Image (cartoon, grey):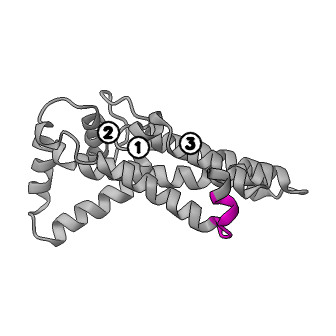
Amino acid sequence: MIKNFLNRTKKPEIILICLILLVLLTGSIGVFYNYGMLTGGIDETLKINSTLKFFKDFNLFDKYSTFLPVTIILVIPFIAIILLGYLALGVGGAVDLERLAIAEAYKFTPYFRFINVIFGLVAIYVFYKIWFLIFKKERLALIASYFFATSLLFAEQIHIAGAWVTQTAMLLIAFYYFLTLLKKQEWKIKEYVI
């Protein structure tokens, strides 16, 4: 069935876009999961508090956090846009945002979960590019990306604001960059630096 569908489709970009939309849909379903009951200690609060602490102290090291600073650095631009949006909409000043971040940090959970959905989309696309780079077959790359996108573990982790999907996306990007370097005949100094 999949083989017939792939044979009839002349544009694999359409299949890849449908696959990415599938991941967006399955990831977005869980963004607001358990939102009304998030007043206590949830897994997301570790990431939320570490990220919001950065805006207060400009320090990424938190003795209570289990997340790597690199994971927090990747989330900071998205949260900065959200906080600027709060300020632009007149939610309050910096003091009100600080109170919101300290006392009601759970209200930021959907934003962090949606950021994970974005990194999940990146992971699927880079996974497709890796398979295409290795095997030079679009059909094989699409099937592999489909299996990766619909795996239960990936579908579960994409809507939880943990560090797993972000780290998976970054590892796939690093692996893709490494594979592109292997294809080069001559390396320049910038490849060594990166």
What element does badge 2 sit on?
Answer: helix
How far across and down, in percent of the image, does residue 113 sit?
A: 32, 47
Residue 187: x, y in percent? 84, 55
Q: Residues within 10 Å of mark 2 (few under 14, many from 20)?
A: many
Residue corresponding to mark 1? 158
Q: Are marks 1 and 2 in contact (CB under 8 Å)?
A: no
Say the numbered circle drawn on residue 47: 2
Please state the extent of the stretch shown in magenta in the rendering: 5-12
User: Is the residue marked by circle 3 packed among few (<14), some (14-19), or many (20+) residues within 10 Å?
Assistant: some
Q: Quadrant of residue 144?
A: top right
Q: Mainly helix, strand or loop, the magenta region?
A: helix
Q: Is residue 11 magenta?
A: yes
Q: Quadrant of residue 137?
A: bottom right
Distance, label 1 to label 3, CA atoms, is 12 Å
SS at badge 1: loop
Residue 42 appears left or right of 47: left
> What is the crowding at mark 1: few (fewer than 14 residues within 10 Å), some, or many (at least 20)?
many
Q: Amino acid at mark 2?
A: Lys
Res 56 seen here: no
Looking at the image, is mark 1 or mark 2 nearer the viewer?
1
Q: Nearer the viewer, mark 2 or mark 3?
A: 3
Give the x, y percent position of residue 51. Answer: 31, 45
Q: Is residue 119 above or below residue 167?
A: below
Q: Amino acid at mark 1?
A: Ile
Asked if the stretch drawn in magenta spans residue 7, the answer is: yes
Q: Residue furthest right?
A: 185
Which numbered dot is residue 148? 3
Identity of the residue drawn at 15% across and 37% down: 38
What kind of element bears circle 3? helix
Question: Looking at the image, is 133 positioned above or below residue 65?
Answer: below
Q: First in sequence: mark 2 or mark 3?
A: 2
